[in-house]
Image (spheres, rainbow, N blue to C red):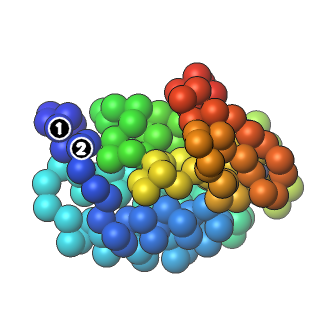
C-alpha cells in the first residue's frame, strides 16, 4: 500500500461483523460481510478487506474439500495482504498472514487426497483491537479485560494488554 496513514481510523462496521463471523468460523458469511465492506469503502483500505475475505474463502474451500480452490485463493489473498503493516486499523494483519501461511503449508503437506483429514482447529482467529476487544489466540473466544489484565472465560488463557505485541510474536 502506498499511504500507510490509511491504517489509522475505524473499521467499516460490516468489516467488524465480518471479522466476528470469521472467528466463529462462518466463512461463507464472513465473505458476504467483507464484500459489502469492500464495496462501500473508499480508498486503499478496501484491499485489506479483500485480502481477509480471500483468507475466509481459502478456509471455506478447505472445509468443502476443494484443494485447488484453496491454494489458488490463498495465493491471491497473500498478494492483497503482503504490503500492509503488521497492524492496520487495529487488525493484526501480520498474525493473519502467518496464520494463513501456516494453514496452507499444513494443507500442502496433507495433499489433495487427504484434505478431509484437515484439522479445522488450525483456523486461528483474526485479532483486532477495535473497541478494545480481545480474542483468545488458543480458542477464539472473546476475552475479558480488567485493568489491562486480559483473560479468556473459556480456556483460562491470560495476558497483560501491554504485552500484546510480544505475546503474539
Ligand atoms: Zn481461550
Residue at 63 percent across and 33 percent down: it is 160
Q: From what the image shows, is residue 52 above or below residue 108? A: below
In the picture, measured across the screen, residue 56 lies left or right of residue 156, that is left
Report helix, strand or loop for mark 2: loop
- Residue hosting label 2: 8
Neighbourhood count class around disc 1 (C-alpha, 10 Å): few under 14, some 14–19, many 20 upward: few
Q: How many labels does the image show?
A: 2
In the picture, measured across the screen, residue 1 lies left or right of residue 116, that is left
Q: In which quarter of the image is residue 148?
A: top right
Q: Could you say where residue 67 lies in the image, as x and y percent from the top left? A: 65, 56
Asked if the residues shown at circle 1 and circle 2 are in contact, with their CB atoms under 8 angstroms apart, the answer is yes
Front residue of this view, candidates 33 and 140: 140
Front residue of this view, candidates 75 and 15: 15
In the picture, measured across the screen, residue 112 lies left or right of residue 12, that is right
Whether residue 79 is visible, yes or no, is no
Residue 5 disc label: 1
Q: In which quarter of the image is the N terminus?
A: top left
Front residue of this view, candidates 115 and 81: 81
Neighbourhood count class around disc 2 (C-alpha, 10 Å): few under 14, some 14–19, many 20 upward: few
Whether residue 83 is visible, yes or no, is yes
The Cα atoms of the two marked residues, 1 and 2, are separated by 5 Å
Residue at 15 percent across and 34 percent down: it is 2
Q: Could you say where residue 142 lies in the image, as x and y percent from the top left? A: 65, 59
Q: Could you say where residue 149 lies in the image, as x and y percent from the top left? A: 65, 40
Front residue of this view, candidates 155 and 45: 155
Amino acid at each position: 500500500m502506498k499511504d500507510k496513514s490509511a491504517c489509522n481510523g475505524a473499521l467499516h462496521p460490516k468489516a467488524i461483523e465480518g471479522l466476528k463471523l470469521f472467528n466463529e468460523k462462518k466463512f461463507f458469511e464472513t465473505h458476504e460481510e467483507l464484500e459489502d465492506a469492500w464495496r462501500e469503502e473508499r480508498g486503499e483500505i478496501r484491499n485489506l478487506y479483500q485480502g481477509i475475505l480471500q483468507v475466509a474463502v481459502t478456509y471455506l474451500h478447505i472445509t468443502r474439500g476443494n484443494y485447488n480452490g484453496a491454494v489458488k485463493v490463498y495465493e491471491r489473498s497473500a498478494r492483497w495482504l503482503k504490503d500492509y503493516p503488521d497492524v492496520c486499523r487495529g487488525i493484526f494483519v501480520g498474525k493473519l498472514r502467518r496464520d494463513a501461511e501456516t494453514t496452507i503449508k499444513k494443507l500442502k503437506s496433507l495433499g489433495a487426497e487427504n484434505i478431509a483429514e484437515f484439522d479445522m482447529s488450525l483456523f486461528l482467529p483474526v485479532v483486532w483491537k477495535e473497541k478494545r476487544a480481545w480474542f483468545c489466540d488458543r480458542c477464539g473466544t472473546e476475552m475479558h479485560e480488567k485493568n489491562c489484565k486480559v483473560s479468556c472465560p473459556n480456556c483460562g488463557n491470560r495476558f497483560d494488554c501491554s504485552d500484546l505485541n510480544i505475546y503474539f510474536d
